[in-house]
Image (cartoon, helix red, strand yellow):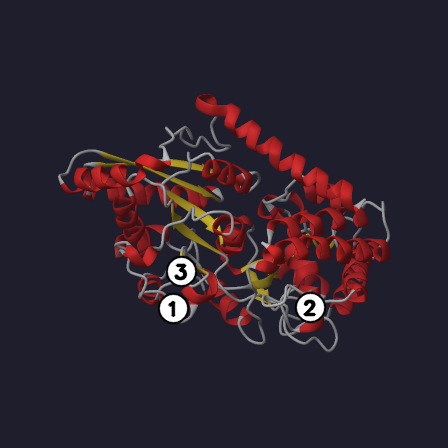
Amino acid sequence: MKKQLKKSISLFMAASVAAVTLMGCGSKTDNKAADTTAAAQSSSGAEASDTAADTKAASGEPVTLRFSWWGSDSRHQALLAVIEAYEKKNPNVKVEAEYQGYDGYYEKIMTTLSSNTAPDVIQLSKEWLPDIQGAKHYLADLSTLPVDLTTLKDRLLEIAGTYNGEPNVFPCTVGGSVTYVNTDFAKTYGIDLTKNYTWDEIKELGKSIHEQNEDAYLMTADADMLNRLFVQPYLAQKTGKPLVDEETYAMNFTEEDAKEAFQNVIELYETNTLEPFGEAATFAGQADQNNKWINGNIGMIVDYTGSAPKYIASIDSPLDVIPMPVIKDAQCSGVAYSGDRGFAINDNSANKEEAAKFLDFLMNDPEAIALCKTDVGYCPTKQSDDILIAAGVVSEIQKKGVELSEPNSYTNNMISGNTELEVIRKDLIQEVVYGDITPEEAAKELVEQYQEILDELKTK
């Protein structure tokens, strides 16, 4: 099974490359994104192109930038408003927006980078940096470009935007993960909003709630949420560390730890704490649009603090946040407090200087901060807090969530978020949920496959 899975990943990535390459001129992103086609420039002419582009921008001649991101409708609208504001101030610059949902975004960006057709400004997850910069120097060194990095909150650039000592990503958010709670649901079923529940207590509560009302479930989660917000935190709670040691490439968890993490997921379904997986999958990446959540038949959703605005807007009942569940005698909260995503500049862009100016406007200009609110991310810069709190934009719920996510958290590292490792873990979780393998078998497979991948990564 190990070799078959690895082969399937390789085939999937190859198919993704072929599919996106063939899509060429005629393809659009899921949410009416702009045409993703860009003429490839040869590496031999890149330096000359950069010089010509810089001269063009300085002279006020027309410059076209491509800007790619993923997100919800609220993020799309915020970034489109920023683009409009920037173009008004810089009439010689045209920014083409390329946006979509999260699904398939990583594959698209990796393909465009490798084929030299990537956008000029790109939203990235910090966990993709080893995949991208480890393969080739695809992303520009932001410290060499006209974007002010000193505005970022303490240590945020270091832990969320730097690879091999070089700042490649300007983090657009800071925070961690929390549990969002429908307070009316909590009142109905006796949920204590002052309590930091253990996973065992959550399962007892979930079982009781479903027994009282067969339409009600305490929680819901899709495959990505199970992977990043249930299993990964569980393992961190066991060890107090990231999944993989950054220096030695050794796993910080044991096979027994992994078995417990998989077993916990099974028990969440067996107790009817979690909504059936097939029903939740209908709303993958859009838990706020889940009918049961909207109608008050789901009481809690574990998610990142940056998701607060969409959950606040999705239900009529007041929303609250509590810490995410922990194991008994947890070594840490399991929350990877950091900035999980940000914006980078394509190092092969013909307009790096102009792209950096746009990025600086996006993240540091008071007008752009006011337009983005918290739809793009939660206050990564020192001034964004002041601007949005003064404007009454930052909600008490999101502020409380960020504050709750920091204590006893841990700093994740990039190797632990390696995409191939993520895929392996996610696939095994789904096999466990569907009953194709046992938690014991899944744990054994996880450790074996991790070891194989880590051995390969260590030798690169």
Residue 100 to residue 451: above or below: above
What kind of residue is marked 2? Asn
In the picture of the structure, the residue carrying the numbered disc 3 is 166
* Horizontal and vertical percent position of residue 258: 77, 62
Question: Neighbour class for label 2 at 10 Å: few (<14), some, many (≥20)?
Answer: some
What kind of residue is marked 1? Lys
The quarter of the displayed image where residue 40 is located: top left
Q: Give me the C-alpha separation between circle 3 and circle 1.
A: 17 Å
Q: Nearer the viewer, residue 56 or 157?
A: 56
In the picture of the structure, the residue carrying the numbered disc 2 is 252
Compare marks 2 and 1 and give the one earlier in the sequence: 1
Compare marks 2 and 3 and give the one earlier in the sequence: 3
* Residue ranking furthest to the top: 26
**Tag on residue 153?**
1
* Horizontal and vertical percent position of residue 72: 49, 44
* Horizontal and vertical percent position of residue 412: 57, 65
Q: What element carries label 2?
A: loop
Question: Neighbour class for label 3 at 10 Å: few (<14), some, many (≥20)?
Answer: some
What kind of residue is marked 3? Glu
Decide if residue 340 is in sight here.
Answer: yes
User: In the image, is 240 to the left or to the right of 68?
Assistant: right
Residue at 71 percent of width and 56 percent of height: 450
Q: Give me the C-alpha separation between circle 2 and circle 1.
A: 29 Å
